[in-house]
Amino acid sequence: MNHYLESVNPLNGDIVGRVATTSEQQLQQVVSNARQAQTEWAQQSLQQRVEILTQAYQQLEPQHPELTRLISLEMGKDQRRAHYEAGGAIANAPYMAREAAEAFEPKQIAVSSQIQYQPLGVVGLISPWNYPLAMANNLLIPALIAGNSVVLKPSENTPLVADLFVKTLQQYLPENLLQIVHGAGDVGRALVQADINMIAFTGSVAAGRDIMANAASGLKRLVMELGGNDPMIVMAGADINAAARFAVASSFENAGQMCTSTERIYVDHRVADEFRQRVVQLATQYRAGGWNELGVNIGPLVNATQHQKVLQQLQDAKDKGAEFLLGDAHYPLPFIQPTVVDGLTADMQLEQLETFGPVVAMASVNSMEEAIRRANDSDYGLGAVVFGGAGAADVANQLQAGMVSVNGGVGGPGDSPWVGAKHSGFGYHGSAEGHRQFTQIRVMNY
């Protein structure tokens, strides 16, 4: 008897569609098929893999409008952003495939010695709902170009867009090279425990711990991005208008459901009043609503659980004395209206936890030493930002994060890695070194 996973539109609770969930027996067969497919795929040259994958991605172009629609319907992203995400995944694939192939070319280290990059085998990808195509894509391409086969388990919140994505590619890839399994956490756990060689995961710290525990017996390779609680520091010499624009845009992007959203802001007390006023002015220009409504730039949160989590953090802050400069701690489903909170303190959940909602949370500080201490007082360490003039680079160099930026957003140019420190990352992806984490390094002496 088949069981089904229903995809729910967070805007109105309507059923978008459904997919059959994967049983444990079916999962074992999927992995077995993947292992057989991988053997033949690994015999192809790097250039052949690039050509085959590039041709497969070209066939996604006619599906661009439907992929856009499904992203919007399944997780609430506005149509413009959903269009960019789907288009970016399709357009960037050839470049990323070539970049990965270059990373996997043997490296000559002596006349008769090479460093070689061999496939690991079967890679399980567990992808998130907030960027259902982009995040899966960033892991899928290097895994396949390395010569691995892939089993993708997408978030149960966004199964339809992943299903269309995979099934379109499957028509042009070798049979069973790329497969998809569906379900909730139990299916993800079964995939981790299955006869695979590596797990690449993007999601919460709690889920990451569970994956590590279940992967331990097989000593499986892991690459995991585990979220963030990104700090921002605003110095007295900062361009206040630029800093406020970044703070609001970063906090509200994708309804705040972004791992590198700015989540806590520490502002030099000498410019705090000016910064607050400008943030509120900008925040009032944002509007929450459905993805197809004009003028909307904040969509619904993905589900009732995430909505309640944000409300709980806002109520906690209110109970502990925070001042709400815009908005409140009570919003009906499915939206969190643009909210600005001042008076953030170290004991508030807004400072301690990842919020994943459209909230600007800030505090005035008396010194940069205090700002740095509070910015670093977190188990997370994905991104961090400093806005300032002279001395900003010195402050940035003291922040404990995998990606730090002065007067701009995190994430480096070109093939920079996407990397988190502390509990925000276990391994990393992107860049030649990130791609190589999908391989077994072998030293070959001739």
Image (cartoon, helix red, strand yellow):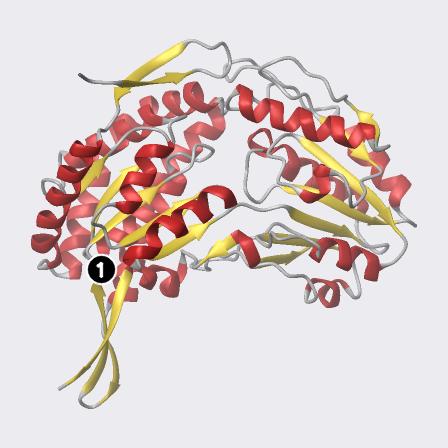
Say left or right for 223 vs 324.
left
The quadrant in which residue 58 appears is top left
Say left or right for 6 vs 44.
right
Residue 324 placed where, x, y %? 82, 27
Q: Identify which amino acid the numbered label 1 is placed on.
A: Leu
Residue drawn at (63%, 19%) of the image: 288
Q: Nearer the viewer, residue 210 or 333?
A: 210
- Residue 59 in view (yes/no): no
Tell me the quadrant of the picture where the C terminus can be found: bottom left
The quadrant in which residue 367 appears is bottom right
The residue pinned by badge 1 equals 120
Residue 26 placed where, x, y %? 16, 32
Residue 302 sits above or below residue 375 on the image:
above
- Residue 248 in view (yes/no): yes
Question: What number of labels is visible?
Answer: 1
Under circle 1, the secondary element is: loop
Residue drawn at (89%, 47%) of the image: 271
Residue 227 sits above or below residue 282 on the image:
below
Residue drawn at (25%, 66%) of the image: 440
Residue 331 placed where, x, y %? 68, 16
Residue 267 sits above or below residue 338 on the image:
below
Q: Nearer the viewer, residue 199 or 256?
A: 199
Tell me the quadrant of the picture where the N terminus can be found: top left
Residue 426 placed where, x, y %? 45, 57
